[in-house]
Every structure is written in C-alpha cells, then in structure tokens.
Image (tube, helix red, strand yellow):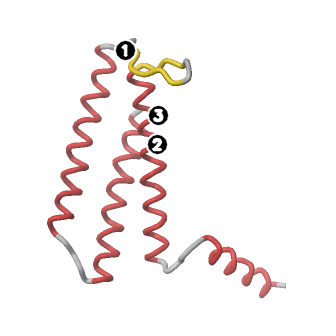
Amino acid sequence: MFKLIGSLVVLMLSNILLDISLVHLKLEFNKEKFYKNVLKIIYSSIAIILMYLSTYLSPNIMVIEINGISMNLRNGMGVIFTAGIVLYAYKCLKKLGKLLKVNDIAEVNNCESNKKGENN
C-alpha cells in the first residue's frame, strides 16, 4: 500500500512541476494556483496516511459492495489509489507531450514510421 501512496504523491508532484514548466513557457505563472495545488497535496497526503492507519485499527470493516463483491477499507483505498495513479499519469503524459511538442500518438507513430523508412 505504501508503494501506491508514494506513487500517487509522486505523480501529483510531477503534475504540478509539469504545470509550472508549461506556465513558464507561456509566462503566466499564478502563485495562488501553485500554493493551492501544494496545499492539496499536503492535505491529501495527511488524509491518506490517517485513512491507512485506520485500516490497522479496524481491518475487517466492509465499506463498499460492488456487484456482490464486498471490500474492506484497505482494499477500497487500493482501488481508489490505483485509479488516482492512472488519472495523474495520464495528465502528466499529456503535459509532457505538450512540453515535447508532441500533439498526439498519431504524430509519434508518423515519426517512428519515418525513422524506419530512413533506415531501410
């Protein structure tokens, strides 16, 4: 579970850093938005740690049932963290693409096809 929590926090930080990079390119830095996002990470991290500690105090409490499958708090948190990781990874990849001036996957595929054609 610590790996999931760590991955989520790292991706949240990378998302902010990529935002800063994109903003510097546009020269539109907003301190208020930056501090708001940093506070979001701090508060989210504290809440996540407290929730994780609660799973040790009451490990067998069922918190959700989806299609007949019951989940306790620890498993439910794992699902949510995994979804958060996927979401933040997607956001980071989109921003990284903007920084590298790659608009979409088709453009990357075209570049790869051109390189293969040059090698033949």
Circle 3 sits on which residue?
79
Circle 2 sits on which residue?
83
Residue 72 pos. (x, y %)? 42, 19
Quadrant location of the C terminus? bottom right
Q: Is residue 66 above or below residue 99?
A: above
Q: Is residue 51 left or right of residue 114?
A: left
Name the residue furthest bottom. 118
Q: N-terminal of the two: label 3 or label 1?
A: 1
- Residue name at image x 32 percent, y 13 percent: 58
Residue 69 pos. (x, y %)? 54, 19
- Residue name at image x 43 percent, y 62 percent: 92
Amino acid type of the residue that numbered disc 3 sits on in the rendered structure: Val
Q: Is residue 49 above or below residue 106?
A: above
Marks 2 & 3, CB-CB < 8 Å contact: yes
Q: Is residue 22 above or below residue 79?
A: below
Category of crowding for the residue at label 2, using alpha-carbon neighbours closer than 10 angstroms: few (below 14), some (14–19), many (at least 20): few
Q: Is residue 97 above or below residue 51?
A: below
Marks 3 & 1, CB-CB < 8 Å contact: no
Amino acid type of the residue that numbered disc 2 sits on in the rendered structure: Ala
Residue 85 pos. (x, y %)? 44, 47
Q: Quadrant of residue 84?
A: top left
